[in-house]
Image (cartoon, grey):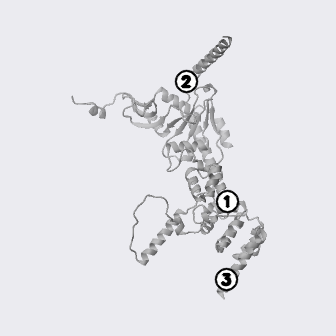
Amino acid sequence: MAARCLFRSYSRVKNVDQNTRILVRCSRRMLCSVPSDSSSPDAHVKPQFMDAEVQDILTRIAGLDLEKVFRPIKQELKPPTYKLMTDAQLEEAIQSAREQAQRLLKMPPVLPERKPINDVLSEDKILEGMDTAKYVFTDITFNIPHRERFIVIREPTGTLRKASWEERDRILQVYFPKGARRLTAPPVFQEESLKVVFGQDRHEDVLDLCQVQFEPDSSEYIRVHAATYEDLEKMGKYDLLRSTRHFGGLVWYLVNARRVDGLIIDMLQEDLLQDAVSLVGLFNKVHPNSEIAQEASSQQASGLDLLKIYAKRESQRAGYIELALQAYEQTSAESSV
Amino acid sequence: MVHLSSFLLKTYHGGHIVIRLAMAGHKQSNRPFYRIVAAYNKRARDSKYIEQLGSYDPLPNIYNEKLVSINSDRIKYWMGCGAHPTKPVAKLLGLAGFFPLHPMTVTETERRRALAELAEEAAPEDGVKQQEL
């Protein structure tokens, strides 16, 4: 707001260009900054996706299945190489493979949706009818980050306005092309095509394509991801994403929507109790005002007790969770005895 | 005879530096595309330039946009070194907001509007005449 008032007063000055560019740049920076606090969550501050603790929990839940991460993908056919190694070298190789898998499994960021740009730099009525086409002016100076680049459009009515986010993405792709990104989005991302692809169990491919094509805070990205997560939750096919880098995003979405039931049951079926416990812990952190969190903090519960509290209070399918917990306790009692 | 031009151009250049539009792409195709370029004044329009500062595509694309790219940093540098922009470059930069508006842009717009009004007056008259016939 302050920037806009300043803008109006400065626009009367003759050297419009310099001042507006500096001011616009400042206001752009304010618009584009992403809130990232790495401090521990208190009662007032909601924990963000990028917090160290949250990331820790999510990486642990996501799992690290080397077989799945390094499964054969479509690449150029090369004859296989064979190496003769001692046991120690083999362990080293496995260790380095694990580290590379961890790097491959780095989670893409989850950002709030970007606000649309509606800035008009100048309205020149004298230029009306100058041309039937719009002029798009891009600043191709090398050392500016793409978010701060000036992309300005002069309409046939004479208004000089800033380009909207979709136009920006397209034009940045023209002048600074990025790998496999296409100028127009592939038709996979329409509703009907998404349904077909989900029927074929190819959620991972869709999410990878989405990652390449859209910016993380664009509305398209968020819509596609929401659709994928909804479908996964409806079908209960959490295992598809289990050892990929999209699992953290799925968990975060479900925790924010408070629909963690299906996921917990799936984990219990796979005997991943530690993961279920940490999931409930994460839920408590994100929703500190819910009943579960308050009970847990009052009783100082941990481990299986957390799951019992969750089963009592929040979940719809409480019976199943309690049964599973009882079965686990019995088996652990038998194995210890 | 021995071609002395290459020896001469290394030390002597006639004229000053200009920022102008040079046609890029192949002469055979019926598709213009301009590069915004800093070059010596006396050089041919499409021949060797000092630095490319941007591009201009005069034909609109499927979204009805004419794409212009401007390397503002380098243009400022060359203007500081004393380069002169030509009229079309000055008009483009004026439309962009980088320069103040060029007066000829306004004049051209007014002329176009006047022509359009004349065409509108002529067209209804033709329509009326055909109805009478």
Chain designation of label 1: A
Asked whether the residues under marks 1 and 2 belong to the same chain, the reply is no
Instruction: Examine the image and state in which quarter residue A28 appears.
Output: top right
Q: Secondary structure at mark 2?
A: helix
- Residue B74, position as x, y percentages in the image: 46, 39
Please tell me the numbered disc located at residue A307.
Answer: none
Chain designation of label 2: B
Q: Amino acid at mark 2?
A: Pro
Q: B111 or A24, which lies in front? A: B111
Q: Amino acid at mark 1?
A: Tyr
Chain designation of label 3: A
Give the Cα distance between marks 1 and 2: 56 Å
Q: Residue at x 48, y 40 (%)?
A: B73
Give the Cα distance between marks 3 and 1: 33 Å
Quadrant where the C terminus of chain A lies? Answer: bottom right
Q: Nearer the viewer, mark 1 or mark 2?
A: 1
Q: Nearer the viewer, mark 3 or mark 1?
A: 3
Q: Secondary structure at mark 3?
A: helix
Label 3 packing within 10 angstroms: few (<14), some (14-19), many (20+): few
Q: Amino acid at mark 3?
A: Ser
Asked whether the residues under marks 3 and 1 belong to the same chain, the reply is yes
> Which residue is disc 2 drawn over?
B103
- Residue A80, position as x, y percentages in the image: 41, 66
